Amino acid sequence: MLLGLTIRDVVLIDRLTLAFRPGLCVLTGETGAGKSILLDALGLALGRRAEAGLVRAGAKEAAVSAEFAVGRNHPAHAILREAGLDGDGETIVLRRLLATDGRSRAFVNDAPSSIGLLRELGDSLVEIVPGRSRKPGTTGVPRGSAKPKPRGFSPRAAKRRICCATTSMSSGR
């Protein structure tokens, strides 16, 4: 589960710290409110492609960190152990620094890491799904479809959703 997101010098954001509570968290807002900026920042921490244009004008570098609570049997622990990092804690912190020249540095639990490891961990921890997009080659089922769907759920209700898939969330608690 995503516990928190800390953003510094990303696009229009000077400094921002978000704390998330257990359960469904939905980002909503008018066009231009900044939802995409938050998702781009989270993507940086998850090892997604970085562009120098994400660094706020006048800043030397952007920084994003995402903290996750993970169950003991979560696949992220095996990924950490395979990479030679401590994989026994109940939290994982992914952090990325992006310079104005486009170069970036990655950290996992404050240890220097590769972007590839960040991406692999990110893929095991989070799925970011644009609300109205469709996967190429599918039969028209909305990409945002997840089973089981909560009662009253409408994929058109929000333009973007963040689904944090962890063992604790899928185990029925």
Image (spheres, helix red, strand yellow):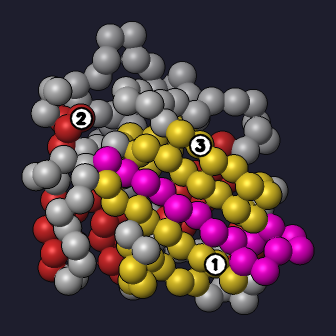
User: Which of the two marks, 1 or 3, is nearer to us in this view?
Assistant: 3
Q: Is residue 112 above or below residue 137?
A: below
Q: Which residue is mark 1?
A: 98
> Could you tell me the amino acid type at mark 1?
Leu
Q: Is residue 155 above or below residue 112?
A: above
Placement of the N terminus among the 4 image quadrants:
top left
Residue 133 in the image, given as x and y percentages of width and height: 48, 44
The residue sitting at 66% across, 43% down in the picture is 35
Is residue 156 found left or right of 36 in the rendered image? Answer: left
Q: Which residue is mark 3?
A: 18
The residue sitting at 23% across, 30% down in the picture is 147
Extreme top residue here? 152
Task: Give, as a single range, the part of the protein colored magenta.
Answer: 55-69
> On residue 169, which mark appears?
2
Q: Disc 3 or 2, which lies upstream in sequence?
A: 3
Is residue 8 found left or right of 107 in the rendered image? Answer: right
Placement of the C terminus among the 4 image quadrants:
top left
Q: Secondary structure at mark 3?
A: strand
Question: In the depicted view, which residue is nearer to us: 76 or 72?
Answer: 72
